[in-house]
Amino acid sequence: MTTLEIGKQLVELCKQGKNAEVIEKLYDKDIVSVEAGAPPGGSAETRGIEAIRGKSKWWADNHIVHSATCDGPFPHGDRFIVRFTYDVTNKPQNRRLQMDEAALYTVKDGRIVREEFFYAMG
Amino acid sequence: MTTLEIGKQLVELCKQGKNAEVIEKLYDKDIVSVEAGAPPGGSAETRGIEAIRGKSKWWADNHIVHSATCDGPFPHGDRFIVRFTYDVTNKPQNRRLQMDEAALYTVKDGRIVREEFFYAMG
């Protein structure tokens, strides 16, 4: 698959709320995921598909998604950008919040090897 | 200025249509600009502030902007992403077209040193 085809699949699956399927279908086993900011006491970087599955499951288990949008992909060489918005409730905090971000994906040999999330904090 | 402050200035100036001012206020003299695709017979890469001024002037001289949006910035470390849409008429071709893209900027020592445009072609 080309970078554009992978980007289109990712956007299509995200629009259907199938985020776990994105990982299984498109991510490399050595995927690296980098947040714009580290959680308190944690790292901004997550390495390897097992750890990413855990991060994705934690997110799904701890948020109620009221609505979400997914816009793109915007390709450039072996990378593409996708724009995301989420209106969610964080269950442990019982707090509703809006997330507004962009993600930069890097593709190698037909799999996503790196995802970087861009957003303002605070 | 922080990466976020530079991103906010860029978005503010773009919203006002002051794209030339972005170059003078925020770009490093050794700025590198990279398109997703090369024009026929040309290069995807433009180097140095003089060449970028020329590219910007060519674009302004050859397009009528009917409307434009500029969304962001989305920061991550020393980089930020901005989402752009343009509804323009290309004057030489007398053809109206819609551009839908994302740009990834890299900041060093308070100036933008790299801009990369992400969009689908064809």
Image (cartoon, coloured by chain):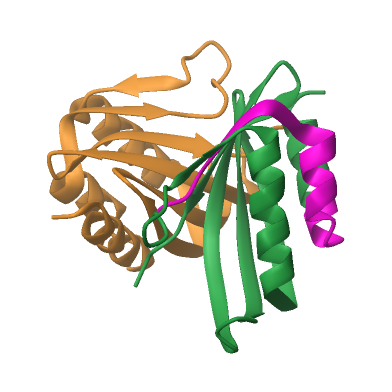
Chain colours: A orange, B green
Q: Is residue A35 left or right of residue B71?
A: left
- The one nearer the camera, B67 or B56, is B56
Residue at point 81% right, 60% down? B15
Residue at point 69% right, 35% down? B49
Res. B19 image quadrant:
bottom right
Looking at the picture, how far across and down is residue B2, in whole percent?
77, 24
Above or below residue A58? Residue A97 is: below
Counting the numbered discs, the total is 0
Assign the N terminus of chain B to one quadrant of the image.
top right
Assign the C terminus of chain B to one quadrant of the image.
bottom left
- The one nearer the camera, B50 or B18, is B50
- The one nearer the camera, A113 or B11, is B11
Looking at the picture, how far across and down is residue B18, in whole percent?
85, 56
State the extent of the magenta-drawn residues as a range: B13-36
Looking at the picture, how far across and down is residue B38, in whole percent?
40, 54
Q: Is residue B17 magenta?
A: yes
Above or below residue B49? Residue B56 is: below
Q: In this view, does A33 lie to the left or right of A69?
A: left
- The one nearer the camera, A82 or B50, is B50
Q: Is residue A61 left or right of residue A78?
A: right
Residue A28 visible in image: yes
Looking at the picture, how far across and down is residue A115, in whole percent?
37, 36
Res. A106 image quadrant:
top left
Q: In this view, does A98 lie to the left or right of A85?
A: right
Q: Is residue B18 magenta?
A: yes
Residue B8 visible in image: no
Residue sticking out furthest to the top: A41
Res. B95 image quadrant:
bottom right
Above or below residue A38? Residue A62 is: below
